């Protein structure tokens, strides 16, 4: 399953983005290092660095870095860690408690189980309750959710360019 991932950061000219590869990363600390490296290589000001990732129509992840702070990850569905190794990068630990079990007697899989800091983009236009709603609203694909987040934060044009 292909994963699209990109880092967005502020520069003197506004938001800039660059695509990043997640395959060789081992955890959230490696993700944070890749984000810092991408921002530094393009003269990012370091005040806000955001990584977004999506895997087909299954899940999305976001990581936020501010200055030298610790990374703040969010994963739209904890169940994704069982089927996609890249989803594990959005966990602060090796927590793998989610299951792919069906809801007893219904034949349906459970609703998405978002995990992480849902408030990580509140100051960029997406409060936690809205981010959580994007993970559970029927018909909203991960790409749509990230487009909404990017639009509110001001880097939708940069995201669209990288997706093209």
Image (spheres, rainbow, N blue to C red):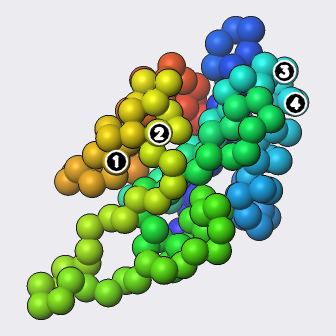
CB under 8 Å between callouts 3 and 2? no
Q: Which mark is residue 41?
A: 4
- Tag 1 or tag 3, which sits nearer the N-term? 3
The reply, left or right, for residue 130 in relation to residue 38 is left
**Marks 2/1: CA–CA distance:** 9 Å
CB under 8 Å between callouts 4 and 2? no
Dot 1: what SS?
A: helix
**Marks 4/2: CA–CA distance:** 27 Å
**Marks 3/1: CA–CA distance:** 32 Å
Dot 4: what SS?
A: helix
Dot 2: what SS?
A: loop
CB under 8 Å between callouts 3 and 4? no
**Marks 1/4: CA–CA distance:** 32 Å
Q: Which mark is residue 148?
A: none
Other residues around mark 4 within 10 Å, as few (<14) / some (14–19) / many (≥20): few
Residue 137, position as x, y percentages in the image: 23, 50
Q: Which mark is residue 119?
A: 2
């Amino acid at each position: 399953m292909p994963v699209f991932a990109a880092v967005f950061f502020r520069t003197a000219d506004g938001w800039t983005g660059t695509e990043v590869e997640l395959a060789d990363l081992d955890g959230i600390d490696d993700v944070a290092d890749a984000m810092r490296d991408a921002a530094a290589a393009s003269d990012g000001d370091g005040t806000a660095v955001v990584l977004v990732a999506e895997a087909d129509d299954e899940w999305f992840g976001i990581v936020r870095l501010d200055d030298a702070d610790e990374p703040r990850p969010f994963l739209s569905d904890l169940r994704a860690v069982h089927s996609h190794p890249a989803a594990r990068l959005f966990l602060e630990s090796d927590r793998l408690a989610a299951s792919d079990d069906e809801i007893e007697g219904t034949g349906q899989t459970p609703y998405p189980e978002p995990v992480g800091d849902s408030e990580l983009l509140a100051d960029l236009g997406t409060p936690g309750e809205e981010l959580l709603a994007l993970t559970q609203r029927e018909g909203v694909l991960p790409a749509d959710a990230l487009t909404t987040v990017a639009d509110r934060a001001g880097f939708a044009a940069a995201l669209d360019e990288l997706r093209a």
